[in-house]
């Protein structure tokens, strides 16, 4: 019975995604939008612009037909450096949940053990993605100070800001070289420089980069010595990195305690689901066991959040 249920759920999800991928754009909506546009009083140039815009929007819709995730999640995956698109990561995530459950159920293992495999498949990929993104952001922050020195020297030598960005993209290592190269590619494809820089800040979510982009955009609008501004920002970033390292050393004990308090009970519970599923079954099937689980989860969250709040110092 359990195997049939798992097969039904997996088949239903597969059919849903196939239908979603193959669903065409609604023709009624396209015709309605055309009638609405073309029956307005417009000049020939306006109508030509509307036709060009409509073709572009139609191409974008076809391009995004297979897109199941939001732009924020796409930026999150891109900023992690993982060589997968957001859609590919989503499919891999779903597969890591249901494929092990399906295979373990065919072997005939206990339903609690099968559920433990599903929990692992649901929890592990986002944790790995978050870890990769955090490491990449930390490396990006360390490289940004050196990049500002290179860009400041290039601007002092008479190069434009775009040429200074190209120097960073060609002379430095990833991830900062890859991010600047992506921004330069967007500019070459017709995206304004201001928007390309803002796209980079949206992907990286780095306060030092936000400071740099704000200074560059302000300097472009009101004027000013851009090389001096970048020197000041470079010194500020170096001081922030030094303070950040000191704070991480002083709060390492609290962060490790929060990590142990947060993960150890969960790891032990999942291990029991593999080792002795009948023991875990008592907590799931009995009213007293449910109360104990709820109380444990509440106390676990309170302890984890309290220690994390103490160790989380704003700088």
Image (cartoon, helix red, strand yellow):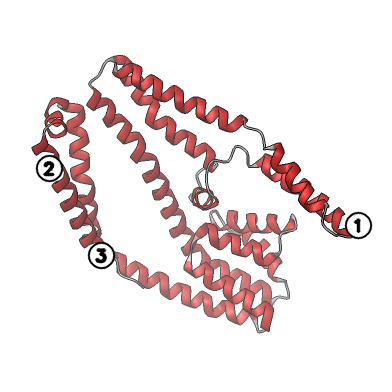
Residue under label 3, please give it: 309
Q: Nearer the viewer, mark 1 or mark 3?
A: 1
Q: Nearer the viewer, mark 2 or mark 3?
A: 2
Residue 42 percent location from the top left of the image: 86, 59
Residue under label 1, please give it: 44
Q: Quick one: SS at disc 3?
A: helix
**Marked residue nearer the N-terminal end (1 or 3):** 1
Q: Mark number for residue 242?
A: none
Residue drawn at (22%, 56%), measured in percent from left and top?
304
- The answer to whether residue 105 is seen in the rendering is yes
Q: Quadrant of the C terminus?
A: bottom left
Vertical relation: 168 (above or below) 289: below
Residue 243 located left or right of residue 300: right
Extreme-right residue of the structure:
44
**Marked residue nearer the N-terminal end (2 or 3):** 2
Asked which quadrant contains residue 59, the reply is top right
Vertical relation: 135 (above or below) 164: above
Q: Quick one: SS at disc 2?
A: helix
Residue under label 2, please give it: 291
């Amino acid at each position: 019975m359990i195997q049939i249920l798992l097969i039904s759920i997996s088949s239903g999800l597969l059919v849903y995604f196939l239908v979603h991928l193959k669903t065409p754009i609604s023709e009624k909506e396209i015709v309605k939008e055309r009638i609405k546009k073309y029956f307005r009083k417009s000049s020939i140039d306006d109508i030509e612009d509307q036709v060009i815009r409509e073709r572009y929007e139609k191409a974008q819709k076809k391009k995004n037909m297979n897109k199941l995730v939001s732009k924020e999640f796409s930026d999150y995956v891109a900023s992690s450096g993982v060589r997968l698109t957001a859609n590919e990561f989503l499919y891999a995530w779903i597969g890591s949940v249901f494929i092990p459950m399906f295979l373990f159920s065919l072997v005939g293992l206990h339903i609690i053990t099968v559920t433990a495999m599903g929990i692992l498949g649901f929890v592990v990929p986002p944790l790995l993605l978050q870890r990769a993104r955090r490491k990449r952001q930390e490396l990006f922050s360390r490289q940004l100070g050196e990049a500002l020195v290179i860009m400041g020297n290039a601007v002092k030598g008479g190069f434009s800001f775009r040429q200074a960005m190209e120097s960073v993209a060609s002379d430095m290592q990833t991830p900062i070289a890859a991010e600047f190269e992506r921004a330069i590619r967007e500019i070459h494809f017709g995206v304004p420089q201001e928007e390309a820089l803002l796209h980079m800040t949206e992907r990286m979510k780095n306060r030092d980069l936000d400071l740099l982009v704000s200074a560059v955009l302000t300097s472009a609008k009101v004027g000013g010595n851009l090389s001096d501004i970048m020197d000041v920002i470079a010194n500020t970033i170096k001081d922030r990195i030094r303070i950040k390292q000191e704070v991480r050393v002083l709060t390492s004990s609290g962060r490790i305690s929060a990590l142990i308090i947060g993960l150890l009970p969960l790891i032990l519970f999942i291990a029991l689901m593999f080792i002795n599923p009948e023991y875990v079954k008592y907590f799931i099937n009995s009213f007293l066991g449910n109360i104990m689980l709820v109380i444990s989860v509440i106390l676990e969250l309170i302890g984890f959040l309290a220690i994390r709040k103490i160790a989380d110092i704003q700088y």
